[in-house]
Image: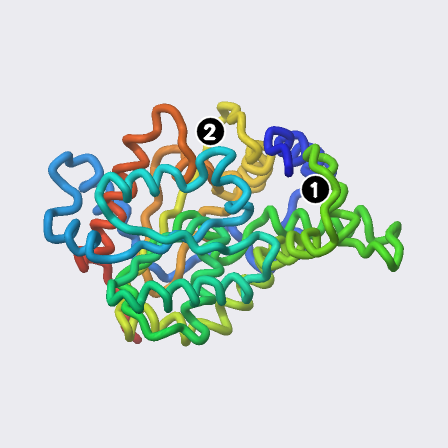
């Protein structure tokens, strides 16, 4: 098991050897524009009004549904470590809303995880209940893939994506480039570049040696979140996404975040956060803020400094913020106020 307290050291050592740039990526995150509808002002109007939120009819609709939670990268390892997904599970439990957790795995490809999500959607749909999906980080990528290929006949009533790298992340671009630069000339045929690189990263994070299949799986995750791969996937799959969100009118809300300012954040993301801000990329420590939007849908940009784990792990003093974010996000999705774009 990786000691996540050492990730800060690992990120420091990684970024110390990097120069600025996009590292082979295909997206300039400083100028990325995504055609999506900004719901931020409406979100905060409701957030600050104590009387706003889910009404009884909306809450009842949710209580007659099932929410599917899709974890992000390393999510299956962190649920017991830092209460990963604990805040949203607590909120659902307090409101008597049933949920299921997709048993996706970081070591599996997005195609494999998409199959797991589709199977869970099919299982839940047999109950006759409507389905809402909440996905965090890489889970959003896996979810979009699950819904654009061989989706089972099921009533998807709404989707909330939290900090998902829809167009990739600078961190994956940087790690992939660092691996290539550091290890390509020195590895042997029995230990290719990516395995040597990941073994070094795991060593830096005080982790034990991993079986080859786990290293390959982790490398697949890094590659899946590179901006080149994500921008190409989005271009190829826009017709299927438009069918979901425009023709089938499935509401989707992306929660975009940023963590800015000079104050030091004692998180594993801090070095990456500062590195990206230094080259003009607004980010949450892992994902550029501009990458967290899906075309033809709606988004909110949280105004408070919010790192990549603030909404999904239990933190002192953050429960009110977390609860209001979940409630208002569901309020927007359930009440029918989110619009999708036409062909105009």
Residue 272 appears left or right of 67: right
Task: Give the SS element for disc 2.
Answer: loop
Residue 208 falls in image quadrant: top right
Name the residue rendered at 57%, 52% in the picture. 106
- Give x and y (percent) for residue 241: 39, 70
Image location (x, y in percent) of residue 202: 71, 40
Give the structural element (helix, strand or loop) at label 1: loop
C-alpha gap between disc 2 and disc 1: 22 Å
Specify which label sits upstream in the sequence, 2 or 1: 1
Q: How is the image coloured?
A: rainbow
Q: Residues within 10 Å of mark 2 (few under 14, many from 20)?
A: few
CB of mark 2 within 8 Å of CB of mark 1?
no
Q: Nearer the viewer, residue 252 or 215?
A: 215
Is 243 located above or below residue 113 in the figure? below
Residue 258 at what x, y percent from top left?
A: 43, 39
Label 1 environment density (alpha carbons within 10 Å; few <14, some 14–19, many ≥20) = few
Q: In the rendered view, does 40 fall on the left or right side of 213? A: left
What number is the disc on residue 257?
A: none
Residue, x 23% and y 58% (percent of image)? 338
**Which of 268 and 117 lies nearest the eye of the viewer?**
117
The residue at which mark 2 appears reads as 261
x, y (%) of residue 291?
47, 53
Q: Quadrant of the C terminus?
A: bottom left
Measured along the vertical axis of the image, is residue 171 above or below residue 158? above
- Indicate left or right for 152 with 225 as reference: left
- Asked whether 35 or 240 is in front, the reply is 240
Residue 190, above or below 90? below
Query: Which quadrant holds residue 190?
Result: bottom right
What label does residue 19 carry, if any?
A: 1
Q: Where does the N terminus fall, quadrant-wise?
A: top right
The residue under the point 29% across, 61% down is 131
Please report the residue visible at 75 percent of the width from the left and 49 percent of the height from the top: 179
């Amino acid at each position: 098991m990786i000691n996540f307290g050492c990730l800060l050291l690992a990120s420091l050592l990684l970024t110390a050897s990097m120069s600025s740039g996009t590292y082979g990526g295909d997206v300039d995150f400083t100028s990325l524009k995504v055609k999506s509808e900004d719901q931020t002002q409406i979100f905060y109007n409701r957030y600050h009004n104590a009387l706003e939120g889910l009404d009884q009819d909306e809450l009842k609709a949710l209580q007659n549904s099932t929410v599917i939670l899709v974890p992000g990268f390393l999510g299956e390892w962190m649920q017991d470590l830092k209460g990963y997904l604990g805040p949203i599970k607590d909120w659902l439990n307090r409101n008597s809303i049933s949920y299921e957790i997709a048993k996706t795995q970081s070591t599996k490809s997005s195609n494999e995880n998409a199959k797991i999500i589709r199977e869970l959607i099919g299982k839940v749909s047999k109950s006759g209940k409507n389905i809402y999906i909440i996905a965090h980080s890489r889970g959003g990528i896996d979810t979009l893939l699950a819904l654009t290929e061989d989706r089972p006949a099921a009533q998807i009533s709404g989707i909330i994506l939290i900090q998902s790298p829809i167009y990739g992340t600078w961190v994956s671009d940087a790690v992939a480039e660092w691996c290539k630069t550091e290890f390509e000339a020195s590895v042997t045929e029995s230990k290719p570049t990516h395995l040597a690189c990941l073994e070094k990263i795991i060593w830096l994070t005080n982790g034990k040696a991993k079986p080859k299949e786990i290293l390959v799986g982790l490398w697949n995750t890094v590659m899946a979140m590179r901006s080149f791969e994500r921008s190409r996937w989005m271009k190829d799959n826009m017709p299927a996404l438009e069918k979901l969100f425009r023709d089938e009118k499935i509401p989707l809300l992306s929660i975009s975040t940023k963590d800015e300012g000079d104050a030091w954040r004692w998180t594993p993301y801090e070095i990456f956060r500062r590195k990206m801000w230094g080259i003009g990329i607004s980010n949450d420590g892992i994902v550029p803020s501009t990458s967290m939007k899906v075309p033809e849908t709606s988004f909110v940009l949280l105004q408070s400094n919010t790192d990549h784990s603030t909404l999904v792990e239990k933190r002192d003093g953050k429960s009110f913020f977390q609860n209001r974010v979940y409630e208002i996000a569901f309020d927007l999705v359930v009440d029918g106020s989110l619009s999708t774009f036409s062909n105009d």
